[in-house]
């Protein structure tokens, strides 16, 4: 399939948007995006990158500095007019802006900033996560020490959660450290492990969050470990 010069020109102009999209996609946990969503966000990120670059150079001019500041802003002109030469330096500097913007957007997404604001002002009750599993472990107030009750094997795994999976891509997965394994009914300590990896389907286990602020290993429920 032959790629036209217009397509190559468009890809080059939108390169900062591609950079920002790749960064956000890699740094945030999301479902695989559809083609139309990728195109949409690439365009949005590109336009925002150029706008941030434009306001940045305007600020430099206001401060009286002409260092690295071009004489004009050619993105929209080059986008709408195929005869307009592409300012390579503008694309390069905007790509740098796109890197910073992508990192900033990723932080905002991972910290759930938008939904936190909307919930605070009463505009939404959406938790901003695909599953409550993700929300529970992302919430800063939730302790990382957990007791996992494995109903199928009648065991309790107590330890510190150091890594969890995205429940949308399959079974729930969790990696525990400093693990104590006990009988779920009697509370009898069976053995200890430095690390333990668990993978279960939904409904096969219960996760209890343990408050260790007072240095206790007590588990509320059927048993203590």
Image (cartoon, grey):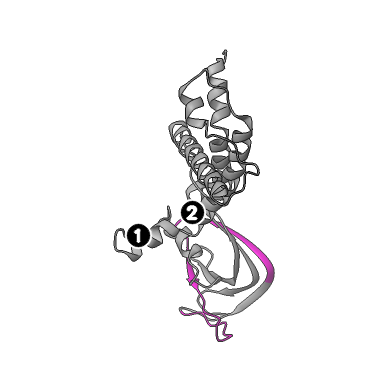
Q: Nearer the viewer, residue 116 or 34?
A: 116
Q: Is residue 16 above or below residue 199?
A: above
Q: Quadrant of residue 214?
A: bottom right
Instruction: Report x, y in % for residue 42.
Output: 50, 36
The residue wearing badge 1 is: 118
Residue at image position (57%, 37%) is 16
Say which of 197 and 145 sits in front. 145
Membership of 24 in magenta stretch: no
Separation (CA) of disc 2 from disc 1: 14 Å
Instruction: Give the residues in magenta.
Output: 193-220
Which quarter of the figure is the C terminus placed in?
Answer: bottom right
Of pointers 2 and 1, the one earlier in the residue sequence: 2
- Is residue 7 visible in the rendered image? The answer is yes
Residue at (43, 55) in percent of width and height: 129
Q: Which residue is mark 2?
A: 109
Residue 179 tag number = none
Task: Confirm whether the magenta stretch covers residue 215.
Answer: yes
Secondary structure under the numbered disc 2 in the rendered image = helix
């Amino acid at each position: 399939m032959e790629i036209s010069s217009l397509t190559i020109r468009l890809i080059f102009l939108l390169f900062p948007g591609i950079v920002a999209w790749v960064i956000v996609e890699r740094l945030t946990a999301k479902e695989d995006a559809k083609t139309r969503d990728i195109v949409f966000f690439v365009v949005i990120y590109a336009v925002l990158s150029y706008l941030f670059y434009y306001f940045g150079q305007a600020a430099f001019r206001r401060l009286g500095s002409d260092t690295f500041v071009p004489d004009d802003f050619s993105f929209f002109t080059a986008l709408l007019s195929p005869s307009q030469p592409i300012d390579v330096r503008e694309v390069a500097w905007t790509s740098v802006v796109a890197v910073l913007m992508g990192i900033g957007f990723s932080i905002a997404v991972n910290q759930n900033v938008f939904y936190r604001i909307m919930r605070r002002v009463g505009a939404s009750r959406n938790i901003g996560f695909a599953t409550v599993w993700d929300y529970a472990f992302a919430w800063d107030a939730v302790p990382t020490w957990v007791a996992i009750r494995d109903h199928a094997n009648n065991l309790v795994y107590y330890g510190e959660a150091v890594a969890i999976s995205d429940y949308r891509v399959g079974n729930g997965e969790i990696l525990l450290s400093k693990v104590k394994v006990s009988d779920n009914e009697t509370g009898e300590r069976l053995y200890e492990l430095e690390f333990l990896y668990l993978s279960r389907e939904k409904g096969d286990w219960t996760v209890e969050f343990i408050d260790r602020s007072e240095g206790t290993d007590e588990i509320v429920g059927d048993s203590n470990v």
